[in-house]
Amino acid sequence: MDAHHARPQAVPPPGGTRRKAAAAATREWLVVSSSGGACLEEVGKYQVMARTGLPARDLRVLDPHLSYPSSILGRERAIVVNLERFRAVITAQEVLIPNSKDPVVAPFVRELQARVSDSSEANQACDIDGEALMKEASGWPSSVVPSTGQKDASEASKQNNGISTGENSGVPAPPPLALCKDHSMKKVLPFEFRALEVCLESACRCLEAETLTLEQEAYPALDELTSKISTLNLERVRQIKSRLVAISGRVQKVRDELEHLLDDDMDMAEMYLTEKLMSQRLAESSLSRVHENGHDHEDDNDDDDDVTEESRLGHLFLRGEDIQSDPGSSNGSFTAIKPNIEELEMLLEAYFVQIDGTLNKLSHLREYVDDTEDYINIMLDDKQNQLLQMGVMLSTATVVITAGVVVVGLFGMNIGISLYNTPTTPEEVRKSDMEFWATTFGTIGGCVILYILAIGWGKKSGLLQ
């Protein structure tokens, strides 16, 4: 066979490479259900996306190998939580934790299971009865669906969910309550808020513990530095200040994220996953009832439109949102929707106050560090001034001694004068000795007088203290 017609040989697929890629594409997730049970699952990225409805960019926030700032993202079917080392995907029925084997995350997982299981036991102990609930909470006005074309869907929703409609619009519905056996009304937080509360509590507790540890190390080190300035103490304070800046930035980011959520009502409304799921089931139930009634095709289309509107209003119904209609519109169209996010707002405000208190502690510590630095700089400036004064005094003494050296140099010249004549008589010897000592003490006294005058002038003029 010619080389031109020869078939190329097939290259065997790199099985090892594919297996490695498949292993890299899947990740071990800890799934905590609404009943408190937990299990490990090997789930790929696309499976998680289909399971939670999250885009790929939100899953990258949960990657433990990447560094993302703290964030809380509310999506259609899930809440993405990235607070410090606590990362989770919260849905209406389960929590997915990617880094469950992290020793820091282990207490968070135990707390989450305990909190969810306790809430599940509390819910089982309470018998939820819609009619009894509305009878006990009769002081709450009912919400309204101001559309005449939605009568069938409204009746279906009332039969399925025990929600009664009134005649006055813009009045909030009662919050979700549980009627217990002791006839006490207890407000039950949705599953996603209980899980979010555990995430916030764990993050705040972790930051609070780091802040407390830093305070216990910082204040003694700063006090020791003020009493004794040394290279070791300065290095300790430098490391403490670096840690202080890092922790302050992390706490500030968590505080900014909570503040951003509190300022945006629609973002908080997006986090009501359980109620959105209930409204979806309400719409499906209403749609099935409409199809069971056997209406003709045209009526079915009209009812489908009504059910679509009912599904949107059902979510508002369950949320207790204020609906404002356009008075100039004849079909009762809605112009503004004010979500009722009181539960989530109170939850976020509680942890906002806690994280703000932690930030205030760090701010006080930073002010103490700055004050210590100012005090150290003042002390160093004072030492420097003392060294400068000593230098001035030594320079003055050098100048004065130089004047004496000049006198000695004058007498040391090799020039013949009568003073250098060798005495022959005792009287001349005595006179020569007196002249020598007079010259010596006169030179020394003159230098001392010049030094005293120079120092006195420096103090008088303010150059020396």
Image (tube, rainbow, N blue to C red):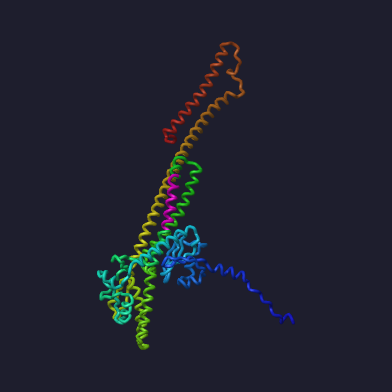
In this rendering, the answer to whether 77 lies above or below 99 is below
- Give the quarter of the figure containing the C terminus: top left
Task: Give the percent coordinates (x, y) of residue 287.
Answer: 37, 81
Q: Quadrant of residue 72?
A: bottom left
Task: Give the percent coordinates (x, y) of residue 20.
Answer: 59, 68
At 31% across and 65% down in the image, what residue appears? 186
In this rendering, the answer to whether 380 lies above or below 170 is above
At 35% across and 82% down in the image, what residue appears? 289
Q: Nearer the viewer, residue 257 or 23?
A: 23
At 27% across and 73% down in the image, what residue appears? 142
Q: Which residues are magenta?
A: 203-220
Q: Nearer the viewer, residue 135 or 444?
A: 135
Q: Quadrant of residue 453?
A: top left
Task: Give the percent coordinates (x, y) of residue 350.
Answer: 36, 59
Instruction: State the residue lying farthest toward the bottom.
Output: 296
Task: Give the percent coordinates (x, y) of residue 316.
Answer: 33, 73
In this rendering, the answer to whether 262 lies above or below 234 is below
Q: Is residue 239 magenta?
A: no
- Give the quarter of the figure containing the N terminus: bottom right
Total marks shown come to 0
In this rendering, the answer to whether 453 lies above or below 34 is above
SS assignment for the magenta stretch, majority: helix
Q: Is residue 85 left or right of residue 22?
A: left
Q: Is residue 205 magenta?
A: yes
Q: Is residue 228 left or right of residue 421?
A: left
Q: Nearer the viewer, residue 38 or 102?
A: 38
Q: Nearer the viewer, residue 74 or 401?
A: 74
